[in-house]
Image (cartoon, helix red, strand yellow):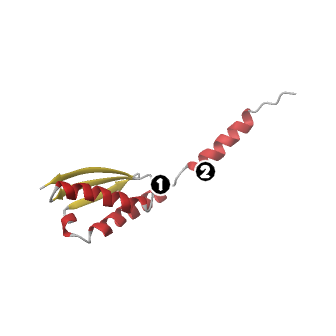
Amino acid sequence: MVRDSAPFFFLLFLFLSACSSVDPAEKAAMDMEIERAILWDFRKESRFDRVEVTCRDGVVLLQGMVPTTKDREETVKRAQKAAHKWDSGTEIVSELSVE
């Protein structure tokens, strides 16, 4: 006896797609928490005063000015560390300039 497995796979697809979807409000809240965590870390040192942080859809954008190339690298590393406490898949995009 051969069974038609199409209904089973259809229901499995519906179930898995419902499990993987993320509520837009939850996504926005997570972005805010990531942004806040990075800014909280940056507030500790004046060299980060001119850095703007924006997070949207799990992608962090760093913009602004830092004093040196070393500071630019440090800014990205610290942003990654702070962001990954909330979401290990967070991407960091740097558009930082050196004074």
Residue designated by label 1: 24
Identity of the amino acid at label 2? Answer: Cys
Q: Residue at x 37, y 60 (%)?
A: 81
Residue 3 lies in quadrant: top right
Counting residues from the start of the chain, the first of labels 2 and 1 encountered is: 2
Identity of the amino acid at label 1? Answer: Pro
The single residue placed furthest to the top in the displayed view is: 2
Query: Circle 2: is it few (<14), some (14-19), or many (20+) Cα within 10 Å?
Result: few
Q: Residue at x 72, y 32 (%)?
A: 6
Residue 13 lies in quadrant: top right
Q: Residue at x 52, y 53 (%)?
A: 22
Q: Position of residue 19 (x, y in %)?
A: 60, 50
Q: Residue at x 26, y 58 (%)?
A: 74
Q: Position of residue 92 (x, y in %)?
A: 34, 51
Residue 28 lies in quadrant: bottom left
Is 80 left or right of 94, judged from the image as shown?
right
Q: Secondary structure beneath disc 2?
A: helix
Q: Position of residue 47 (x, y in %)?
A: 19, 65
In contact (CB < 8 Å): disc 2 and disc 1: no
Q: In the rendered image, which quarter contains the N terminus? A: top right
Query: Circle 1: is it few (<14), some (14-19), or many (20+) Cα within 10 Å?
Result: few
Residue designated by label 2: 19
The single residue placed furthest to the right in the displayed view is: 1
What label sits on residue 78 in the rendered view? none
Q: Give the total of numbered labels.
A: 2
Is 8 left or right of 97, judged from the image as shown?
right
